[in-house]
Amino acid sequence: MKIDLSEYISDIKRSGLVEDRYLSYFEYWVRYYLKSGCLSEEEFSQRLSDDGRKGWQIRQALDALKLYTDYSRTESLHQVVLGSPLAVLENRLKVRHYSRRTIISYTYWCKGYLEYCRKRVCQEKDSNSFCDFLTDLALKRKVAAATQNQAFNAILFMFRNVWEKEPAGIDAVRARKPKRLPVVLSPPEVKNVLGHAKGICGTVLRLCYTGGLRLSEAISLRIQDVDLENGNILVRGGKGNKDRLTVLAGSLVHEMKGIIADSRVVFESSTVPVTLPNAIGRKYPGAAGSWLWWYVFPSERICTDFESGQPVRHHIHSSGVQREMKKAVFASGISKRAGVHTLRHCFATHLLMVGVDLCEIQELLGHSSLETTRVYLHVMKHIAGSSADLDLLA
C-alpha cells in the first residue's frame, strides 16, 4: 500500500521548521515509522536503536514523527502525557538518545524555569513567561550568551516535546554569541606547561595537545580506540555524536604503553563491568567485561550506573585533569588564562604554523564546517615560535 505524504511535506515546508535539504529525510522516517507497526515513540526509538541507528538519526526520526503527529492529529498517534513535566522531559530526552550531560543540563534549566514561574505566579506554558525568564537570565543574573542559549534550547524542548506546544515570538530573545578568538599558547609555553603536568592527568593533558582531543574524548578512550603500532586514536561519539580518527604522537607511545599496562592490572583484578555507550550492551552482551571495551583511564572508584542503578566502573573524572592543568599553568609562570581546552586550540594553531593543510586539521578536530577551523588562521599570526619547538607533536 502506497503512503502519500505529499501534504505532510508541504505542511512542514510552509511552517519553516525544517530546512528544504532535510525534507526528504523527514519523509523517509515517517514512512519507516508507518511501516514498522510501532505504536509509540519509545517503541520506535527502540526499533531504530536495535537497527544500529546513531543517536542523531534517532533524534531526527522522532522529530519527523512529532511533526507528523501534529499534522495528522489522529488519536492513535498522540500519547497522553502523564507525570511531572521534568519526569516526562527526562524520558523524552532518553528516548532521543541525548547524552547524559545534556539530560542533566536540560533538566536543570527546566527545573529553574518551573520554579521561576511558581514564585512569580505566572503560567508556565505561556510564551510570555518563557521570554521573561530568558530576560531575567540576561539582565539580573547576567549569564553568558552561550548559557542563555542553552537554557533557551532546554525550555523550547520542554514546550515542544512535553507540552506539545509551539511558543510564539521567542526568536527575538535568543542571545547573540560574541565572536572571540581562542586563547593559544606558543610552542615553548605549551612545552613548559606540560612539563609540569604529572601522573595520569598529565598524560591526558598531553593527549589533548598532541591529538587535538576534547577533555571528555580523552578520558573516555577505550583500549580498542588506541592503536599504538600505527599511531592512531579513534574518537567515538565526539561532539555531534561523530566518530573520527586522529593522531597519536610518537613521543607519547612509550608513556601510553605504561598507562595501558597499569590499566590491564586493574582490569584483571576487577569483577565490576564498565559503562558502555547506547545499545552496545544489548548488541554485545559480554562487552562490559571485555578488555577491548575497558577504559584506558579507569576510575579507581566504583559508581552507580545512571540508567540501571547497578555498580559499574567509569573513567576518571574530568575535574582531576582540570586541577592538574591549573597547577601546571601556575607552576609554569604563564600569565595567560589557559584551560584544558586551550591545548586543543594550540594543537590546531601549531599544525598550521608548520604548514599542515586546513582541511586536514578540520578532519583531525572533527569540525563540521571549515569556517570553524579557519579561526586558527587569525590566531596563528599572533603566536611566536618555530617548527623546532613542536617536538611534542612529532
Image (spheres, rainbow, N blue to C red):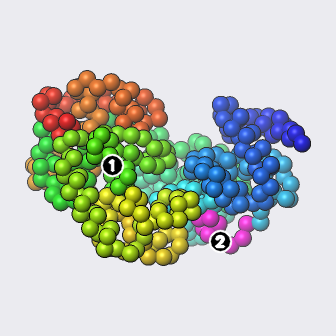
Establish if 361 lies above or below 207. Answer: above
**What secondary structure characterizes most of the magenta part?**
helix
Give percent across and percent down for residue 191: 13, 43
Q: What residue would you read off at disc 2?
A: 84
Residue 357 against residue 189 in the figure, above or below: above
The residue beneath circle 1 is 226
The kind of residue on which mark 2 rests is: Ser
Q: Quadrant of residue 192?
A: top left
- Which residue shows up at 34% across the image and 31% down it? 361
Q: Characterize the local packing of mark 1: few (<14), some (14-19) or many (20 or more) Cα atoms within 10 angstroms.
A: many
- Quarter of the image with the N terminus in it: top right
Q: Is residue 358 magenta?
A: no
* Tag 1 secondary structure: strand
Work out whether 5 lies above or below 205: above
Position of 58 with respect to 14 (left or right) is left
Q: Pick whichever, 56 or 145, lies toward us.
A: 56
Q: Are marks 2 and 1 in contact (CB under 8 Å)?
A: no
Question: What residue span does the magenta drawing correspond to?
Answer: 81-91
Q: Which of these two is toward me, 202 or 131?
A: 202
